Image (cartoon, rainbow, N blue to C red):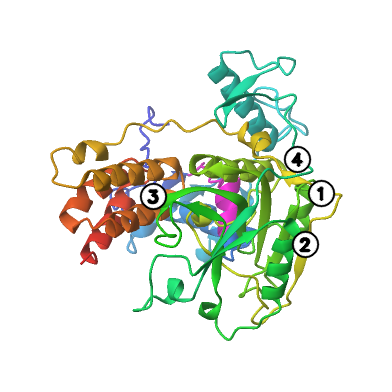
Amino acid sequence: MVAAGGHQIKGTVHGLNGYRHIDNVLIYTARNPNDYYKTFLKWLGFNDDDIVMGMHCLEIYQAVMRCSIRDINSTTRKIVIVPDRRVAEFLEGVFKGSTLIKIPIEIPAKVGRVGRPRVHSNATARKRAQRARDKAKALELPPDANNVSKEICHETPIRMDIVTRCFETAETTWTMNRYDTSHITGGKSYTPAATDVIELETIDDMVELFSTAHEIKYEKKTDTPCFNFTSFIDPKVDARSAVNAQGTSVLILDNDGGGMSRAEFIGILNQEKMIVSNSFSSISEREKWRVCIPLSRPVTKEESGRLFAAIMMELEDNGFVDHGFDPSKKSIASIYHLPCQADKGDSFFEALVGDDRQFMNPDYWLQMVPALLPSPPLAPLLTEGVDWPPDVAEAVKDAVATFDETGTRAGQGDAAIWDLAIDLRNLGLLAEAAKPILDDAARRTTSPKDRLKQVERIIRGWA
């Protein structure tokens, strides 16, 4: 058609006036959002008709309006050809007095399937196969299920065919840090130290502590004390900075009410001991809940991030892409509100710690997520020649290394930049010393422009 004297218009045509002399228009485009985008739009409140109207009908309407219809003084006959009946009927309603005619094209009653034959039954199967290929490539082995593959986890060669998912007993006790409300509200009484450090010898001790806390009703969420099970160098001095965190013995997950119920989660992790309870802001229409999973051994900071990722992969493999778990709570130094009665909704507390369940073996899950090998950060170079005490220079390098564990992954940059800024601020760095380090970290995230703007906001409030 272009060779015959036609004019090809751009995909985005809003506001263009260069085609007002044209009377005949053929618009034959299909605007079909992918499943993830469509799911997001539905989450915002749009239905299927809204999406078709906004992304298909209105876009074609904009293209049609580039022709002589745009000229109110034009009286010539216009012919507009569109791809489907839905758009045609929509335009007929917009342009009163127009005539709707079906193009006499014969379409075969049955058209054979086009394109390559489907290899995988669904997207989940395709992703699982891709991970298997990536893992085999990293190990320089063919992706053959009959091969006994090995991978390095916890600095120990682990055979994937003999790793036990759970253990009857745990090789650890659990140390819980309790934090008073100043860790949420701030104020003169705030210090980075834990308010209490509580040793829990058995899983029954953990259940008793949580169940007792769950009976309490608070007026405000900020009145609720907080906790975590992170091991710090000295929790009585600093139990908040990620740079001082060493590991954890309990996996804690926060669900903000996504597309998966707690019963479905419990069904997927049906072998592991866990404690599930409502959050303060949980309501009947949108339950929010937290799960604590005691581990058979402590995990390091690096392993903690990989363990979280492995559990999320398992949920996605079971069809729960919109699972509702909060990725911003992935930092090992995060604190969580203790169980309590829900403010307005129904309260619930489930201690699934009987003999039918066992302690989660981290090594089983760590096999699924290879250890992260981040690109070398520039921050250690920025410490050279700077008049800092040696311990501060090393602490800065550790803080950046902690950032690299999560901050360079998609969707994790925002929270990781904030954690890094807090660590640098707690180390006593001035704004002019911290900014190059934060800028360097921001450039290595998956959204550098947004993160660099975030750094600017942080630096403005640094004093």
> Dot 2 corresponds to which residue?
351
Which label was assigned to residue 59? none
Under circle 4, the secondary element is strand
Whether residue 366 is situated above or below residue 295 in the rendered picture: above
Q: Residues within 10 Å of mark 3 (few under 14, many from 20)?
A: many
Q: Between marks 3 and 1, how big is the CA–CA gap?
A: 34 Å
- The residue that appears at 16% across and 54% down in the rendered structure is 432
> Dot 3 corresponds to which residue?
243
Residue 164 rendering spot, x and y as whole percentages? 75, 33
Q: Between marks 3 and 4, how big is the CA–CA gap?
A: 30 Å
> Dot 4 corresponds to which residue?
166
Whichever of callouts 4 and 2 sits on the residue coming sooner in the sequence is: 4
Q: Between marks 1 and 2, how big is the CA–CA gap?
A: 11 Å
Q: Quadrant of the N terminus?
A: top left
Residue 100, can we see it?
no
Whichever of callouts 1 and 2 sits on the residue coming sooner in the sequence is: 2
Q: In which quarter of the image is residue 7?
A: top left
Amino acid marked by disc 3: Val
- The residue that appears at 65% across and 39% down in the rendered structure is 362
Q: Is residue 138 magenta?
A: no
Amino acid marked by disc 2: Ala
